[in-house]
Amino acid sequence: MKLKNVYPDHIINRGEGYTHNVNHCLKIGDVLYSEVEGTYTYKTEVNLKTLEGNCSCPYSWNCKHAVATYLVYKQGDFIDADKFLEYLKTLSKRELISIIEQSLCNSPDIALNYDLKTSTNYESFVNDFIDDFSYSRMNKAERLASQFTFKQLLRMLNFLFKNEDNVFEIIYEDYYDDEEGEVLYYFESVLEKELMKKITNEKEMRQVLAVDLLHDEIINSAETLLKFKPVIKSVFSKDKFLSFLLHLENPDMTEVEESITESGRHELYHLPPKNIALAERIANHLQDKGLLFLVAVYKDDYKGIINNLSEFNILISEYYWLRRKLSDIVDLFIRYDFKDKKVTQDFLRKDLLRIYNSEQIMYLAGQINEYDFVKQKVDFKERFSQNKVLLERLFQLDEPETTILINEEEHIFENKHWTEIVEILNYLREKFGRQYIATIIKDNEDIFKTSSTLKSNLKKEGIFISHIRGVLNVEVKC
């Protein structure tokens, strides 16, 4: 499992710069628990099997804090609580009490929670929570969540759902923060999870099913609620029931097949990054070429990709996560020397070029012999490293025509960082010589006369620019 298969590139980049904000990283089983400093101190969890993260931050799911937590773990900077828990099992009762006593002065939460739980009249608390809601009571309810009965949890959640606007207003007045919505949704999530654990019979299950806003949590808690599957199926739509089945560890394939609608099939196609094993089982059972292709992509299965390439054009437009795997697919093409003009043209769509590195573009473009097709992919608004590879192919196909293309381009330096401008000038000098460089710099005088950083770095490349008495002077020494 790789981060890039679960998280967008921009989230990974932010997470990489956030590792120093991770206060601690604790591993218990297959889950990482951490505290990460941001606008506030956020509690973050990462599932090591799927790499998916949950967080108390406003982003809440698969955020930069989760990425930072995982990266800290990969660096080896974590506490392996599994070993500690095994050690605790060897201790006597007196030794365990001694450890707790020594920890209480610095970590009083255990004692505070115990005191709150033992001193609270729960029925009175719920009545007060509903009659006189406050941010303080919400905080206490979060600590007490596991102690409430099924009926009490359902009462509080129904109150929150029916009075959302008023609750938002009260939280804002007490909390004074723009993120009051996220605070409320996190709290509701805590109560919902506890509610699912408290369902003991069909009557209670039907009470929960009657609340539409609880359906998502029913789906997320599918394994816990497996024994109520028949009653859930009788209430849920086909699409919702399919979602429920896909959250089970071992769903019945016949039931999955019977529950698929046209819209539900899209959920199947989003499954590989979340649960590749289940996605593969379903793909093989259904012999669905689209899902077979996506599973093969996720598993870097070259043969599976080739056998189902006919699905590429449909899927690439609809499933954004597939774009994050395109460079891996092209790497497989390179490794196995796969060449197919039609497929190559599909992969060279203009909106996909930014995904590839120079080697990958070179491999794809090298298979195209139609000058106009490659020319259409050149876009001087994009990064020059991308265009450079395409221009090289164009020079191979028709050098005179490519020379005209470059000479007629008026915006070759527009909105470019100085590092790219240096790269462009070096490339043009290699192709057309020193005099050409001097001419093109003078033709774009406004860009070159003001930036001292650009001029300083061009000097290192043997290109000297000065601006004296309103005249731009250029000298190219090598």
Image (spheres, rainbow, N blue to C red):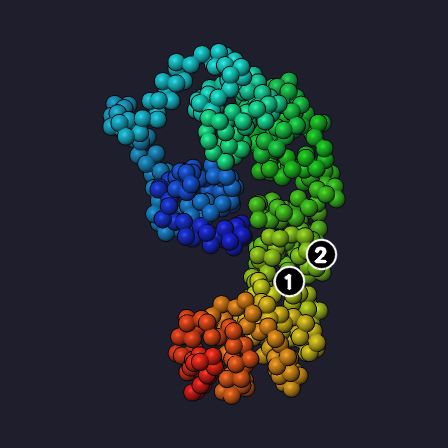
Q: Residues within 10 Å of mark 1 (few under 14, many from 20)?
A: few
- Does residue 242 appear anywhere in the picture? yes
Please tell me the numbered disc located at residue 351.
1
Q: Secondary structure at mark 2?
A: helix
The type of residue carrying mark 2 is: Ile
Q: Label 2: which residue?
A: 314
Where is 373 relative to 236, above or below?
below
Residue at mark 2 to residue at mark 1: CA–CA distance: 15 Å
Q: Nearer the viewer, residue 357 or 13?
A: 13
Q: Position of residue 153 (x, y in %)?
A: 54, 20
The type of residue carrying mark 1 is: Asp
Where is 67 relative to 342, above or below?
above
User: How many labels sit on residues?
Assistant: 2
Identify the residue shown where x is 70% and y is 30%: 236
- Does residue 359 appear anywhere in the picture? no
Q: Position of residue 382 (x, y in %)?
A: 58, 67
Q: Residues within 10 Å of mark 2 (few under 14, many from 20)?
A: few
Where is 378 relative to 98, above or below?
below
Disc 2 to disc 1: CB gap under 8 Å: no
Identify the residue shown where x is 66% and y is 57%: 316
- Of labels 2 and 1, earlier in sequence is 2
In which quarter of the view is residue 345 placed?
Answer: bottom right
In which quarter of the view is residue 254 placed?
Answer: top right
Q: Where is the C terminus found, in terms of image quarters?
A: bottom left
Q: Is residue 164 left or right of residue 177?
A: right
Identify the residue shown where x is 66% and y is 44%: 267
